[in-house]
Image (cartoon, helix red, strand yellow):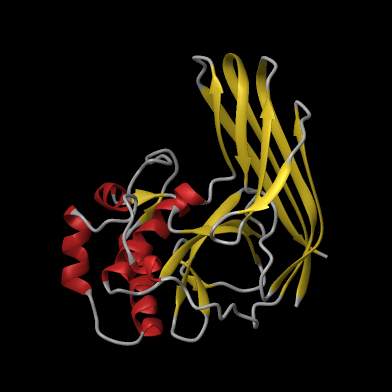
Amino acid sequence: MKKFLYSIKTDLIFSEPVKDHTFVLRATPLVEPGQESLRSSLACQPDCRLAQGSDAYGNTVFQGYIQAPHTSFSFSSTGEVSIDSQRHSKTEPAPYYAKPTELTKLKGTLLEYFEQNRVVGCPDKIADHWLELISKDFRYKKGVTNVATTASEAWALEEGVCQDYSQILLALLRGDGILCRYVAGLLTGEGATHSWVEFYNGNSWVGIDPTHHRHCNEEYMKISQGLDFSECALERGVFRGNATQTMYTKANLIEI
């Protein structure tokens, strides 16, 4: 088991004033076997009351509302967490974890790749197989995809970021009927948020990181989990106004 200090600072800048801003935040550590939140703090600016709850996937969610006009919105999440990678969640997953979503459907060249390279075996063997191939055939590059890019679209581009790696792996695993989920969180030394995949091997959930071609260890802190990125974003909100928004996030996970 290891202990870490974590911090997440996110700023949203609006091109013109907005109001009646309703938002949902997923920005604190997930509590489950192998991960314990020792202390946590979440604050917003402009200041507002946050209502805490949980979603269908067990993520902690905070809901807030800002009525007055504002041109920026920021939130800061800090605290301490303990992580033990030897302890795995054994919660049996719902069947929908094996079903493709709009972001993880096998289409086009990704479907062809799946059919040409699929193997037969247990979930652990299949997951390691795709983990190996993705590391060879997909490249990391910022700026070529966005949050709406599907796994098949990213694969056609042959490059993308951690979100794309994760959703491509989900698409391939679900093609074989393997129960799996998208995970958002922090990785030591990254300076930003990260994502990876967990699959159910029949006994417990196992974390694998296709971006770095490895199995997850104590250096990974989970924030949220879901079927794909759309259910794990740090912030989701709606507001009244015609503004466009730009988002900046910095994050750290430091062992103590």
Residue 137 higher or lower than 157, as above or below: below
Residue 191 higher or lower than 166, as above or below: above
Tally the marks.
0
- The image quadrant of residue 165 is bottom left
Q: Residue 114 location in percent, x, y? A: 22, 67
Q: Residue 256 location in percent, x, y? A: 83, 65
Q: Nearer the viewer, residue 20 or 184?
A: 20
Left or right of residue 117, residue 80 in this image: right
- The image quadrant of residue 116 is bottom left
Q: Residue 239 location in percent, x, y? A: 56, 23
Residue 50 higher or lower than 251, as above or below: above
Q: Nearer the viewer, residue 101 or 129?
A: 101
Left or right of residue 158, residue 236 in this image: right
Determine the residue positioned at 75% across, 34% down: 44
For the N terminus, give its image quadrant: bottom right
Determine the residue positioned at 38% across, 65% down: 96
Determine the residue positioned at 21% across, 73% down: 117
Residue 209 higher or lower than 128, as above or below: above
Q: Nearer the viewer, residue 227 or 249?
A: 227
- The image quadrant of residue 13 is top right
Q: Residue 7 location in percent, x, y? A: 74, 49
